[in-house]
Image (tube, rainbow, N blue to C red):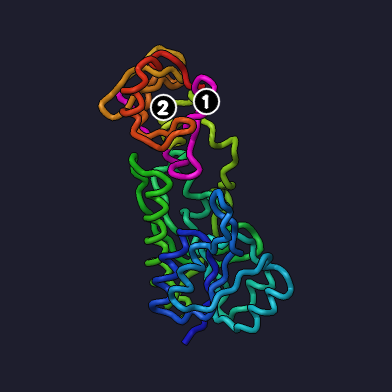
């Protein structure tokens, strides 16, 4: 029975671990250390650790996976393969070379597009028509190893990072279960990535969160959905920060300045964009208030019509 070390941290990794442990022998789950969460800063384990404990699997949470002590411990576990899925630390080559069958990663993009830490967010923000999951060998470079298997999914106009995240996690789990037997039987086909097609998707920064209404309506809509539900896109209105969580491109044209709040709709209200088109805002969160339907906010604030988001 092959010995598998699984490395992952956030919610994305949880279904993958659960399905993997149901069919294969997971000898150790490696994740990030517990972190303070919430206003009371309660020390909380990562989602993967919580699931691993439910499954009564051994766990390991080193501060730095590249420390000599961590590497020696993993050598002592004697894995046949290491499987990572959104672990959150870069693995040193010395660690990657421990298992006989190598080390593989479940990456949430159609490599070589969207290497890096925020492939799901960026695929929606950049208006991609499809996304997917790639099972790949890990090497020294960032998401640059040979691809073993891949599966795609259409990005819908209603998708947010949240919905695409859940779909890709499920796809990644099924793809991994199909791919592992091929690796163990040496019937897989690893293909080098085309370096001419590489793009990078770095983690979302604070600057990335602010909306730019001078962009096209489609770009603004993609930006909103690509940051929903976390960390959330925001704009300023009369000195206060407003988060916007869901929108759609509205069919119509306007000659108003970009950012102008135009008129109420059944589900919310419209805002002018830089290309003379509009987006319809559907879910939002005014400063100091809870997330709510934009129609509710507009009904209570009709005086904001013809004012501007900045």
Q: Check disc 1 and report its element: helix, strand or loop.
A: strand
Q: Residues within 10 Å of mark 1 (few under 14, many from 20)?
A: few
Residue, disc 1 = 240
Q: Residues within 10 Å of mark 2 (few under 14, many from 20)?
A: many
When asked about the image quadrant of residue 37, the answer is: bottom right
Residue, disc 2 = 217
| Residue displayed at 69% across by 73% down | 94
Dominant secondary-structure state across the stretch colored magenta: strand
Is residue 227 magenta-colored? yes
x, y (%) of residue 255? Answer: 40, 12
| Residue displayed at 39% across by 55% down | 166
Q: Residue furthest front?
A: 40
Which span of residues is magenta-colored? 225-251
- Tell me, for residue 9, which label it has, or none: none
When asked about the image quadrant of residue 194, the answer is: bottom right
Residue 4 vs 49, above or below: the answer is below
| Residue displayed at 59% across by 59% down | 35
x, y (%) of residue 303? Answer: 38, 15
Is residue 96 magenta-colored? no
x, y (%) of residue 240? Answer: 52, 25
């Amino acid at each position: 029975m092959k010995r598998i070390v699984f490395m992952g941290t956030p919610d994305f990794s949880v279904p993958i671990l659960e399905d993997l442990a149901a069919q294969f022998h997971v000898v150790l789950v490696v994740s990030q250390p517990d972190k303070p969460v919430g206003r009371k800063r309660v020390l909380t384990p990562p989602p993967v650790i919580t699931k691993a404990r439910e499954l009564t699997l051994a766990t390991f949470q080193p501060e730095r996976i590249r420390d000599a002590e961590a590497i020696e411990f993993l050598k002592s576990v004697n894995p046949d393969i290491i499987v990572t899925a959104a672990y959150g630390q870069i693995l040193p080559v010395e660690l990657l070379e421990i298992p006989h069958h190598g080390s593989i990663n479940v990456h949430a993009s159609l490599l070589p597009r969207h290497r890096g830490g925020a492939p799901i967010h960026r695929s929606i923000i950049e208006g991609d028509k499809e996304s997917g999951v790639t099972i790949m060998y890990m090497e020294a470079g960032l998401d640059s190893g040979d691809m073993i298997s891949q599966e795609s999914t259409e990005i819908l106009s209603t998708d947010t990072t949240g919905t695409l995240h859940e779909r890709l996690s499920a796809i990644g789990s099924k793809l991994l279960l199909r791919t592992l037997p091929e690796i163990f039987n040496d019937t897989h086909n690893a293909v080098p990535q085309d370096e001419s097609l590489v793009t990078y998707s770095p983690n979302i920064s604070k600057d990335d969160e602010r909306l730019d209404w001078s962009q096209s309506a489609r770009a603004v809509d993609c930006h909103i959905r690509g940051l929903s539900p976390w960390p959330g896109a925001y704009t300023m209105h009369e000195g206060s920060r407003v988060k916007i969580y869901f929108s759609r491109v509205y069919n119509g044209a306007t000659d108003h300045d970009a950012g102008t709040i135009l008129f109420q709709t059944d589900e919310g209200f419209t805002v002018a964009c830089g290309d003379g088109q509009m987006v319809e805002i559907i879910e939002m969160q005014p400063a100091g208030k809870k997330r709510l339907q934009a129609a509710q906010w507009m009904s209570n604030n009709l005086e904001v019509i013809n004012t501007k988001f900045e």
